[in-house]
Image (tube, helix red, strand yellow):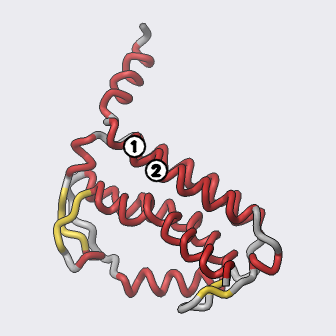
Amino acid sequence: MTQTSTTQSHASALAGRRADALADRLEQGARALADFAASLTDAQWKTLCMPDGRTVGVIVHHVGFVYPIEIDISRPLAKGEPLTGVTMDDVHAMNAKHAIDYADVTKQQAIELVRSNSAAAAAAIRALSDEQLTQAAPASLYADAPVTCQFILEDHAVRHSYHHLARLRRAVQG
């Protein structure tokens, strides 16, 4: 066995089954969202979703757009460091700006973004060890409550597509 393959095997062994399960759930949700989006008519793509008035298309793009951000906010916690400088007000402002910037997003653009960014997010999660997943530190997003890296990933990157898919299905069904 070469040094490179030994190092890769060791790195793979460090990433626990919990990380694989989280990444699998993220991929399943992203795939379901992308498949749903692909099935929509142009009129359904432009359906407004309440209470914020974003379109179905903007929300699909939003999910893909924020995967890298959701992974980034988990990184300090994976090291046992606090997450600082991120509040729900920041999230709401980012979402409002995104809705304006991507009001005319195409179905193809949004689906491709969901697929590519979910794959990258899943790979980043799979690289985490069980020890990193259990690291906890104060998180500004949760009023400085100590939360684990796994909690942040589950509450954001993993859950996000499922949360919005349910919302989008309700909006399209009327």
Q: Is residue 90 above or below residue 137?
A: below
Circle 2 crowding by C-alpha within 10 Å: few under 14, some 14–19, many from 20? some
Determine whether 15 is above or below 134 in the image. above
Checking the image for residue 25, the label placed there is 2
Look at 63% across and 70% down and name the residue there: 60
Tell me how far mark 1 sits from mark 2, CA to CA: 6 Å
Q: Secondary structure beneath disc 2?
A: helix
Lateral position of residue 27 relative to residue 34, left or right: left
Looking at the image, the residue that sits furthest to the right is 42
Position of 124 compared to 164: left or right?
A: left
Q: Which amino acid lies under the numbered mark 1 shown in the image of this protein?
A: Ala
Q: Quadrant of residue 140?
A: bottom left
On screen, residue 64 versus residue 150, left or right, reads: right
Q: Residue at x 48, y 53 (%)?
A: 26
Is disc 1 in contact with disc 2, using a CB cutoff of under 8 Å?
yes
- Up the image or down, 102 lies above or below 138; here it is below
Residue 166 lies, with reference to residue 2, above or below; the image says: below
Q: Residue at x 26, y 41 (%)?
A: 130
Q: Position of residue 61 (x, y in %)?
A: 64, 70
At label 2, which amino acid type do we have?
Answer: Arg
Which residue, given by chain and number where applicable, does mark 1 sit on?
Answer: 21
Q: Residue at position x 53%, y 64% from top?
A: 161
